[in-house]
Image (cartoon, helix red, strand yellow):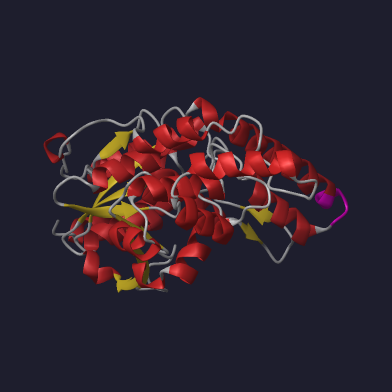
Amino acid sequence: MGIKNLMVLLKKICPSCIHEINTPHLSSKIISCDASITMYQFLFSTLNLTKKNEIVQPQDPSGISSGHIMGLIYRSLFFMENKIKPIWVFDGKPPDEKTDVLVQRMNRIAESEELMNESLDNNDFENAFKYKVQSLRLTDEMKDDAKRVIGYLGLPMIISPGEAEAQCAYLSNLNEVYGALSEDSDCLVFGAKKLIKGLSVSEKSKKKVVQIDLEEVLKGLGLDMKGFIDLCILCGTDYNENIKYIGALTAYKHMKKHGDIETIVKEVIEKQKTSSKRQYIIPKDFDYKKIRELFTNPTVHKMTLKDIEWKKPDANGLEKYLNEEKGFSINRTNNILKRLEAIKY
């Protein structure tokens, strides 16, 4: 989900930190990539409502969705053809502080599935499709499929002990790694030196991506890293609610005035004692120190580029897997293999 309204704030206060770059600019560069977000992108893009009002998505013979592995293959081939070297990063165990968000997410998925079924019963196929999109999720089996595909392609893969965004950020700060590819602004709060986002699901339709430079973010906002993290906590994160009635711009004004959350919280509490007017409301369990620590010292694999290896693709293994286990058509698999064979990587 990321930091609430962070991009809106950056566009308003320091738009110069946001750059539009051509994808060839990433040629010969190593980037850490959030695998889950990429898989979700392709799950969404391969779901279709047909003219016969049928909701369809690619599936393997056992009924498991396969749009996400198609997407990972095509995204990886695009990188390899453009001499971009991806490191695919998968989520591990989320922090306990994220439990409430995950429960809310699962509740929304269950509600969307129920609404989808109701819409289908009423022959309301457009709403059924909308709710189907909202109910999509990645299962453990789907993640395992994705890991196998990446292995056959010979690309490095890391299973983070915690959040993938944190691991991507950590990797992005290793020497020779250019930045982190994710749609989640959390990467910046975890300290990614560059965040790359906006890569289209169709590499032919968009040759430009957005790059956000953390150093320019801090300079433009006039904050150090601790102040930036505090600002994002005030905006609301996956680990905490924001202080009620404090939006992103108001949070920024308070940070510029007071410098840290401690002073802001103290002022809020004092005003609550002396005024009967509606004031900011601090959420229960607003443990900003703990959240700050999660962003400052996240759970990641401490590693160097010596621990990361690009291998020769296993074309035979990939062909057998796609045709025999995932039910890909021979033509689709052959096209993938032709692209893979043509790559001088």
Q: What is the count of numbered marks?
A: 0
* Camera-nearest residue between 113 and 274: 274
* Camera-nearest residue between 293 and 78: 293
Seen in the picture, residue 222 relative to 154 is either above or below; the reply is below
Describe residue 300's horizontal placement relative to residue 119 as left or right. Answer: left
Quadrant in which the C terminus is drawn? bottom left
Quadrant of the rendered image containing residue 125: bottom right
Q: Is residue 88 visible?
A: no
Seen in the picture, residue 214 relative to 18 is either above or below; the reply is above
Describe residue 253's horizontal placement relative to residue 242 as left or right. Answer: left
Q: Is residue 270 magenta?
A: no
Seen in the picture, residue 340 relative to 236 is either above or below; the reply is below
Q: In the image, what residue occupies the spot 59% across and 44% down?
A: 267
Residue 235: give x, y in percent of width and height: 55, 50
Describe residue 97's horizontal placement relative to residue 121 as left or right. Answer: left
Q: In the image, what residue occupies the spot 45% across and 45% down?
A: 260
Provide the residue span drawn in magenta: 119-123
Q: Is residue 104 visible?
A: yes
Residue 50: give x, y in percent of width and height: 67, 63
Magenta span dominant secondary structure: helix
Residue that extends furthest to the right in the rendered view of this protein: 122
Q: In the image, what residue occupies the spot 73% across and 42% down?
A: 274
Residue 115: give x, y in percent of width and height: 79, 46
Residue 205: give x, y in percent of width and height: 42, 74
Describe residue 173's horizontal placement relative to residue 249 as left or right. Answer: left
* Camera-nearest residue between 186 and 24: 186
Residue that extends furthest to the front in the rendered view of this protein: 274
